[in-house]
Every structure is written in structure tokens, then in C-alpha cells.
Image (cartoon, coloured by chain):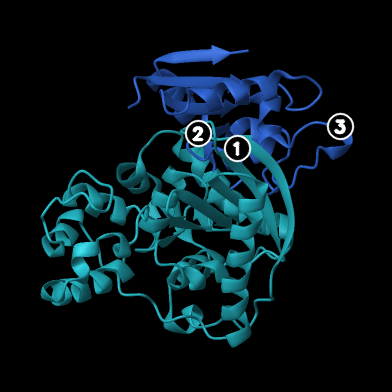
Chain colours: A blue, B cyan
């Protein structure tokens, strides 16, 4: 039984630091205990891009974590997607695109807001 | 009209948003004013959403009125299922297991794993046609994936080729399950004909319980016949474990249960 909800915000590029990896791991271990939403904002929206290949970086494919833990709701901030010219790119199927208001609503609906 | 891959992705992303899908469905009824669309689909960020739909080539706007473009109409038509489309597997190519990419821990049971694998070439929309092959399979339009439950293991096959499996013991079990999945899919592709749509029958534990001996003998290892029914529903046990059912007096019950088990 879930006891609440948490919104994990990723607002920086998924590779180049362990921030996204850490955030996704924290979000994954919260599943089952609470409803989990991962919000992708700013450069964080790059995490929603399909066909990532991180082998040369010697890092796990972080989009795979989104696929593996389908219980996580993934919300990508659409204006950030547009600003980066990514609207014509394929996105991970489980990611929802949310406009400014819908994204803020998802934050407000959650009991906790976690930003690493 | 969108044609190149980037334009197609733009359309796909334009439709990956609930308010915009509502707007498109509303516009299927004919030309509307912006105000009418706001009433029907919500006024929040209305101009923004309409602009995205226009940029994707799905709608046309002029003088405060909005209508579906020819492409928009065709797009919505294409979303409707037709028997001819459902029966076609001729374009699909046999799949191979390209790789098992990652093993991650399961949340519900830390002794089990989740795996990410890849089937190539991707099956795309043909996945939907394959749904009847799997007794507990369901195609999700929203994520474009076929979700299959077999016992505790939940397998999700995406149209793009990604496959995830949960509650897997080890990589060997994952590969074994992937091989079975591949064989089932490739047999259907080799036949070239889509499996007949399966009759949707929802089986409830109480219905199963009705045909069990209801003696609560415990020979199956369960505390009661009802708990056996629930575990049977979950695919965790098989009917063979209920030894009293082998008694000739339960022959009809067994037949009923065998039919019901087909729909679990």
C-alpha cells in the first residue's frame, strides 16, 4: 500500500554527473511505498530521448531505468523540450509531455518534492 | 503533410498530451471556434496547444476557427481499427533477441530482477495484432506496447523493440523467456495471418471457486479452496495440484475449470 507521493525533479543533463542516476535510483526504491513521479525540466528532458547509447560513457543507459520501472510516472516539461529543439525527436513511450500548468500541477499534487 | 521521420515524431509528440488528444477528438465533429474548443477540452494553455497541433500539421486555423487538416482527418481515421488492418502480418519480419542490456533489482522482491532487452527488428504496430497469442496479453495504445502476464512475470514489449521483464530469477531465466517470446511471435509471422481476436472473458476467482471441490482439504498446499482459486488466477499454481478433482464425481467440474483456465 502506498502512503503518499513524491515528485523527483531532474533539471540537469542526464549524463556527465551522477545526479540523474542517483535521482532515478532514489525514485525507484520509493516505488511500492509511495506514488512516484519523475519530472524532467530544463536539460533534464534529454533523459526522455529514445535510443540513448551510454556505453562510451561507461554509464548505465538511464532511459532503460525509465522502461524498467514502468510504475514511475515520467512527466517531461514540454516548453523545455521545445526550447531545445527536441520536439521532432522520438521520446521514451512512457513519458508524458506536460505544459507549464500541467507540470506545476503534478508538482503541487505530490506530498513531497525532491530535488537533488 | 508530414512525411519525413522528424515530422512524424512531431505528430507523435503532439498527440502525447491529454488536452491535445481531447481537442483532436472534439474537432473530429467538424470546424469549431477557439471558444468552443476551450469549453470542451479546457481553457488552460489553449492557444499554446492549438499552435502545437497546427505546427504538427494536424489542424488549420483561420479567423478564430479551427478545423482538422486533411492530414489530421486521415490521422484520426488511421487510429481506428479495421478488420483488414488487424488481419495483416505480411509486413512483419521474424525477430531476433538483439541483446539483454541491463539487469536491475526488482522492487517487490529483492531476490528477483528486472531486465531490459531488445528485439530486432522492431515490430511497431504489428504488436497489436499479436495480442491474441498471449492468454494474459493486453495491448496498450497509450505506450504502444504489448503487456503480457505469465505467473509472476510481467513482460512489456514495446513497438520500438525494447522489452522489459519483471520478477526474473536470473539472466538464464530471462533468456529462456525471451526465446519463448521470440518463437511465439515468429511462428505467427511465418504463418503471415494474424491470430483470430480472442474472446474477452473475464474470469473471477469466485467463478473458479464455484467449480472446485470446496472441501478445503489442503492437498494442494493451500489453506482453502478459495486461496487455491486466487493463486490459480495469478498463474502461480496449476489445476493438476487439486487431486480431488481427479475423482470421477468431479469430472464435469474439471471440464468447466479447464475451459475457464484457458481464459486466465
Q: In this view, does B93 lie to the left or right of A1?
A: right
Asked if both marks, 2 and 1, belong to the same chain, the answer given is: yes
Mark found first going from the N terminus, 2 or 3: 3
In this figure, which residue is indicated by the disc labeled 3? Answer: A57
Callout 2: SS? loop
* Camera-nearest residue between B260 and A40: B260
In this figure, which residue is indicated by the disc labeled 1? Answer: A66
In this figure, which residue is indicated by the disc labeled 2? Answer: A72
* Camera-nearest residue between B122 and B151: B151
- Position above or below: B193 against B1: below
- Position above or below: B257 against B24: below
Residue B210 in picture, x, y percent from top left: 11, 61
Numbered circles on residues, count: 3
The numbered mark 2 sits on a residue in which chain? A
Mark found first going from the N terminus, 1 or 3: 3
* Camera-nearest residue between B94 and B174: B174
User: Hey, which quadrant is residue B137 in on the image?
Assistant: bottom left
Amino acid at each position: 500500500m502506498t502512503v503518499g507521493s513524491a515528485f523527483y525533479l531532474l533539471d540537469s543533463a542526464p549524463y556527465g554527473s551522477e545526479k540523474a542516476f542517483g535521482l532515478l535510483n532514489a525514485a525507484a526504491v520509493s516505488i511500492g511505498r509511495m506514488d512516484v513521479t519523475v519530472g524532467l525540466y530544463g536539460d533534464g528532458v534529454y533523459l526522455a530521448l529514445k535510443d540513448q547509447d551510454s556505453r562510451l560513457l561507461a554509464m548505465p543507459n538511464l532511459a532503460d531505468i525509465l522502461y524498467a520501472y514502468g510504475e514511475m510516472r515520467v512527466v517531461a516539461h514540454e516548453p523545455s523540450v521545445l526550447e531545445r529543439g527536441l520536439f521532432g525527436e522520438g521520446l521514451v513511450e512512457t513519458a508524458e509531455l506536460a505544459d507549464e500548468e500541467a507540470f506545476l500541477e503534478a508538482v503541487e499534487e505530490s506530498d513531497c518534492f525532491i530535488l537533488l | 503533410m508530414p512525411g519525413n521521420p522528424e515530422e512524424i515524431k512531431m505528430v507523435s509528440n503532439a498527440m502525447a498530451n491529454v488536452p491535445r488528444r481531447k481537442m483532436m477528438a472534439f474537432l473530429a465533429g467538424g470546424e469549431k471556434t477557439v471558444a468552443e474548443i476551450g469549453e470542451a477540452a479546457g481553457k488552460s494553455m489553449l492557444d499554446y496547444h492549438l499552435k502545437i497541433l497546427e505546427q504538427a500539421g494536424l489542424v488549420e486555423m483561420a479567423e478564430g476557427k479551427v478545423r482538422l487538416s486533411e492530414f489530421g482527418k486521415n490521422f484520426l481515421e488511421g487510429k481506428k481499427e479495421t478488420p483488414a488492418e488487424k488481419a495483416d502480418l505480411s509486413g512483419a519480419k521474424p525477430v531476433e533477441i538483439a541483446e539483454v542490456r541491463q539487469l536491475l533489482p526488482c522492487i517487490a522482491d529483492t531476490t528477483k530482477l528486472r531486465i531490459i532487452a531488445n528485439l530486432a527488428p522492431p515490430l511497431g504496430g504489428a504488436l497489436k495484432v499479436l495480442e491474441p497469442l498471449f492468454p494474459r496479453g493486453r495491448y496498450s495504445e497509450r505506450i504502444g506496447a504489448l503487456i503480457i502476464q505469465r505467473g509472476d512475470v510481467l513482460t512489456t514489449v514495446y513497438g520500438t523493440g525494447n522489452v522489459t521483464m519483471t520478477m526474473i530469477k536470473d539472466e538464464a531465466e530471462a533468456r529462456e523467456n525471451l526465446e519463448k517470446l521470440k518463437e511465439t511471435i515468429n511462428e505467427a509471422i511465418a504463418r503471415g495471418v494474424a491470430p483470430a481476436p480472442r474472446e474477452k472473458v473475464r474470469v473471477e476467482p469466485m467463478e473458479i471457486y464455484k467449480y472446485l471441490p470446496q472441501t478445503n482439504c489442503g492437498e494442494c498446499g493451500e489453506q482453502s479452496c478459495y486461496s487455491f482459486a486466487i493463486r490459480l488466477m495469478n498463474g502461480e499454481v496449476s489445476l493438476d495440484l487439486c487431486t480431488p478433482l481427479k475423482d470421477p464425481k468431479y469430472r464435469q467440474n474439471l471440464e468447466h475449470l479447464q475451459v475457464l483456465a484457458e481464459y486466465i
